Image: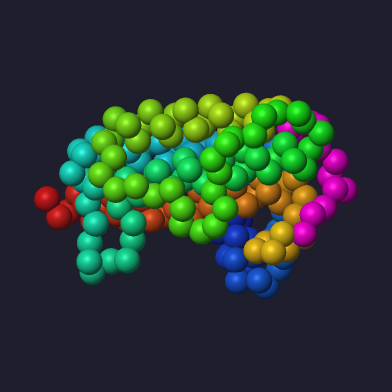
């Protein structure tokens, strides 16, 4: 697993374009990136523990952070993009998700109950695990595509981007969890 001390500076360098996402994805083995993603997803799931629906819906005008409800629904929705991308860059014949994110910030929904957030996140985790397991050994590491937002990407780059997205939003979720709990 990649430690946060190693991962955070790497992601920051890629987000700020000091290095490319393709270069960033070459710094660690694919299995470590995948393991770190699922560990981070588990932290996202654990952050929902002991929350009330009111806390999950809490938003603050003083802080430009999405509510927990918005963050989790966005993560679940945008995962469809990766669900479609990973089979495309591998030799898998897995079916695509009909509705998948195409831009930034899509899929966020307010006032979703904690119970429903947990169910949808668990289901999304099962779906992305199946996609990764189906494609992780059927991709060509030399196959590279050019993406307008992220530049040159291979399979491992897309998995790192999935992880980076999760890391970015878990930070928001934890900050909002603290704000929501102290506001009540």
Q: Would you say 115 lies left or right of 121 here?
A: left
93 sits left or right of 55 in the view: right
Q: Residue at the right extreme?
A: 142
Quadrant of the drawing holding the N terminus = top right
Q: Position of residue 23 (x, y in %)?
A: 76, 60
Residue 87, percent from left and from top:
72, 36
As rendered, which of 46 and 84 lies closer to the eye? 84
Q: Is residue 139 above or below residue 27?
A: above
Q: Position of residue 65 (x, y in %)?
A: 33, 61
Figure quadrant of residue 64: bottom left
Q: Magenta segment: does it hold 86? A: no
Q: Nearer the viewer, residue 58 or 36?
A: 58
Q: Is residue 144 magenta?
A: yes
**Quadrant assignment, res 96:** top right
Q: Is residue 142 left or right of residue 80?
A: right
Query: Residue shown at 52%/46% (left/top)?
Result: 78
- The residue shown at (21%, 46%) is 55
Question: Is 180 drawn above or below residue 15 in the view shown?
Answer: above
Residue closer to the observer: 112 or 46: 112
At horizontal 23% and vertical 69% (from top left) the residue drawn is: 62
Q: Which residues are magenta?
A: 135-146
Residue 111 seen from this side: yes
Q: Position of residue 8 (x, y in %)?
A: 56, 59
Q: How many marks?
A: 0
User: Is residue 35 visible in this depiction of the protein?
Assistant: no
Give the colour scheme shown. Answer: rainbow
Q: Is residue 103 above or below residue 64?
A: above
């Amino acid at each position: 697993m990649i430690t946060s001390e190693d991962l955070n500076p790497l992601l920051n360098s890629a987000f700020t374009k000091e290095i490319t996402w393709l270069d960033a994805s070459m710094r660690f083995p694919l299995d470590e990136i995948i393991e770190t993603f699922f560990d981070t997803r588990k932290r996202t799931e654990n952050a929902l523990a002991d929350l009330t629906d009111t806390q999950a819906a809490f938003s603050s005008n003083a802080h430009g952070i999405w509510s927990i409800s918005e963050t989790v629904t966005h993560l679940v929705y945008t995962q469809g993009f990766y669900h479609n991308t990973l089979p495309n860059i591998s030799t898998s014949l897995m079916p695509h998700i009909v509705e998948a994110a195409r831009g930034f910030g899509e899929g966020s929904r307010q006032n979703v109950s904690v119970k429903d957030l947990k169910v949808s996140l668990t289901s999304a985790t099962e779906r992305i695990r199946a996609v990764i397991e189906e494609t992780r050994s059927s991709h060509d590491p030399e196959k590279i595509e050019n993406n307008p937002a992220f530049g040159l990407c291979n399979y491992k780059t897309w998995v790192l981007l999935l992880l980076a997205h999760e890391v970015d939003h878990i930070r928001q979720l934890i900050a909002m969890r603290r704000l929501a709990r102290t506001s009540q």
